Image (cartoon, helix red, strand yellow):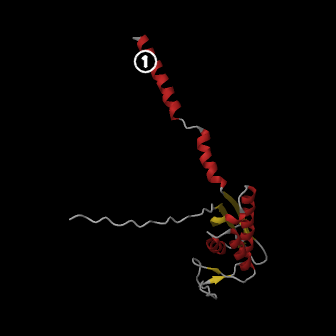
């Protein structure tokens, strides 16, 4: 019996090796799909920027989905107080502006810092070999950072800090050709 049990143990061990070899996924195949996803995006982040979180959230919402060049001109206009940022979430006690944007403000300091992060994301995309004219802002997020307590002449206060992350993606512009449908005569039913 001991010889038979040793043979069955060796057979099951060989079968286990065969099944484990077929179940493993090659690492190269798994990493290639992730490389394709990473190649058409670039990211830049600003950590603990000294800007208002509410202003940064509204600016990020405004530029999300825009072309990078249009977003840069929009942020430059905000910094020059020529264009207002529409406030959709933090609009309490905010006056309406000219045009059809409704409540809005001119967050100059936040616009300058976010413009710097956006230019950094564009530079990262150019380094990866992407076309700058085909870049859009895929994601822009502003989060609250830790607020350090500072002391001074007027007592203790908390400084404003915000994390900002901008992801740009290269879009592939494909030419779409509309196919012309040919009208075929309808078949008449025989009654």
Residue sitting at x 75%, y 73%: 112
- The relative height of residue 85 versus residue 143 in the rendered view (above or below) is below
Q: Residue at position x 61%, y 72% from top?
A: 61
Quarter occupied by the N terminus? top left
| Total marks in image | 1
Residue 37 placement (x, y as % from top left):
61, 53
**Residue 146 shows in the view:** no
**On-image quarter of the C terminus:** bottom left
> Which residue is nearer to you in this view: 11 or 25?
25
Mark 1 burial class by Cα count in 10 Å: few <14, some 14-19, many 20+:
few
Single out the residue that lies furthest toward the right: 153
- In the image, residue 182 lies at what x, y percent? 44, 65
In the image: residue 40, left or right of residue 177: right
**Left or right of 190, for residue 170:** right
Q: Secondary structure at mark 1?
A: helix
Which residue is pictured at 50% across the width and 64% down the height?
A: 179
Task: Quickly name the residue at label 1.
Answer: 8
């Amino acid at each position: 019996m001991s010889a038979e049990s040793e043979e069955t143990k060796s057979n099951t061990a060989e079968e286990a090796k065969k099944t484990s070899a077929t179940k493993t996924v090659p690492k190269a195949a798994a990493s290639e799909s992730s490389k394709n996803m990473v190649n058409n995006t670039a990211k830049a982040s600003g950590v603990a920027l000294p800007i208002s979180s509410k202003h940064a959230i509204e600016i990020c919402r405004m530029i999300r989905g825009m072309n990078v060049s249009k977003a840069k001109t929009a942020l430059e206009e905000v910094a020059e107080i020529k264009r207002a940022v529409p406030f959709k979430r933090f609009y309490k006690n905010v006056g309406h502006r000219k045009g059809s944007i409704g409540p809005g403000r001119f967050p100059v300091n936040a616009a300058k810092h976010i413009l710097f992060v956006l230019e950094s994301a564009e530079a990262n995309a150019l380094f990866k070999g992407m076309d700058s004219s085909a870049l859009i802002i895929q994601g822009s997020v502003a989060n609250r950072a830790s607020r350090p307590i500072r002391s001074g002449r007027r007592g203790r206060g908390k400084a404003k800090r915000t994390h900002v992350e901008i992801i740009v993606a290269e879009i592939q512009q494909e030419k779409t050709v509309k196919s012309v449908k040919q009208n075929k005569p309808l078949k008449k039913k025989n009654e």
